[in-house]
Image (cartoon, rainbow, N blue to C red):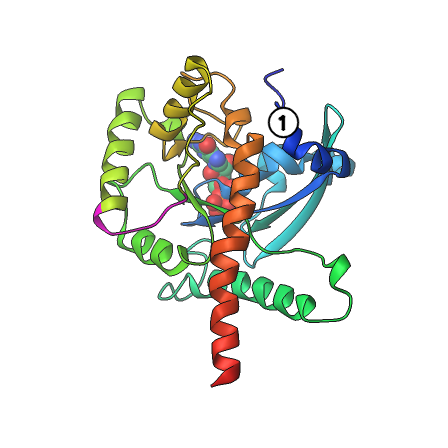
Amino acid sequence: DKEYVGFATLPNQVHRKSVKKGFDFTLMVAGESGLGKSTLVNSLFLTDLYKDRRLLNAEERITQTVEITKHTVDIEEKGVKLKLTIVDTPGFGDAVNNTECWKSVADYIDQQFEQYFRDESGLNRKNIQDNRVHCCLYFISPFGHGLRPLDVEFMKALHEKVNIVPVLAKADTLTPMEVKRKKIKIREEIEQYGIKIYQFPECDSDEDEDFKQQDQELKDSIPFAVIGSNTVVEAKGKRVRGRLYPWGIVEDLKDVTRETHYENYRAHCIQSMTR
Ligand code: GDP
Ligand code: MG
C-alpha cells in the first residue's frame, strides 16, 4: 500500500467524474544543481521510461540536466487514471551564467500560459491541451543555513506564476534534529522574505480529528524533506508520498493555477493588447 503515489485515495463525489475520465497534472522540479531533482522524479514516476535499459542502475541513467525537459507518463492506481507531465529543469550551477538563472524557467511557465491563452481564444476550445504548470517542487540544499540568496531570488521570480512547494533535498544527509531545525529556519525565512509559497487548503471543519491532525502535520512539515533514492519522505507520518498528492490538493493546485496564476497572466495580456 505504501507504494502508491496516492492520487486515488478517497475521491469524493464531487470528483467522481474526473476520476472516471482521468485527469492530468503537470509537475515541475527546480532548484540548485545536484540536489537530486532528476533522481527524485525518476525514482517516483519515470521508471517506465527506462524499461528497455534495465541493465543500467539508477545512478548511471541520470545525467546532468542541461535544458528543460518534459516527460509524460500515464499512471493508473486503483482504476484512476493520471496523465502526469514532469518538467525537469537545469539547476543553477549547470548554466554558465547564474544570474537570472530563473529566467528560462519563468519563460517556460509563461509560454505555457501563452499557448493556453492562444488556444482558448481559438476555434477549437473544447480540446485544449493544458500544459500549464500546476506545481513546482523547489529544492533547497540541506548543506546551507536555510535559504541561499539565489533561492530567494528564484522563488520570488516565480511565486506569482506557479504554486511553489519547497522541499528540503537529500534529507538522508541530515539527522532528524537537523531536519527539524532547518525546516523551522526555512519557514521563517520564507516568511521574512515575503515568498509566497503554495498554501495548502483549509481543512473542512466537519472532518474527523484524525484527518485534521494529519492535515496539520502535513502543513507543519513544510518544506517537505525528500530523499531521492528510494521513496519519498518524512519518517513520522507514514504514507507521505500519498499525502503529498492527495486528491483535494491536486485539485486545489490546479484551481490556483487557473484562477490565480493564469488569470494574472491573462489580465496582463489583455491589458497590453488594449493599450
Ligand atoms: P539534480 O541536478 O538536482 O537533477 O540532481 P541529480 O538527480 O542529478 O542528483 C545529483 C547526485 O545526487 C547524484 O549523484 C544522485 O545519485 C545524488 N542524490 C540524488 N538524490 C539524493 C538523495 O536524496 N540523497 C543523497 N544522499 N544523494 C542523492
Ligand atoms: Mg537534473
Any magenta on residue 180?
A: no
- 57 vs 226, left or right, is right
- 53 vs 152, left or right, is right
What secondary structure predominates along the stretch shown in magenta?
loop
Where is residue 266 shown, x and y percent of the image? 53, 67
In the image, the segment drawn in magenta is 192-198
The residue indicated by pointer 1 is 12
Name the residue: 49% across, 60% down. Answer: 105
Of 108 and 172, the residue lying toward us? 108
Of 264 and 198, the residue lying toward us? 264
Image quadrant in which the N terminus is located: top right
Of 43 and 86, the residue lying toward us? 86
Where is residue 4 shown, x and y percent of the image? 63, 23
Where is residue 170 shown, x and y percent of the image? 41, 33
Mark 1 residue's CB less than 8 Å from ligand 1: no
Assign a secondary structure to mark 1.
loop
Name the residue: 39% across, 18% down. Answer: 213
The answer to whether 3 is drawn above or below residue 63 in the figure is above
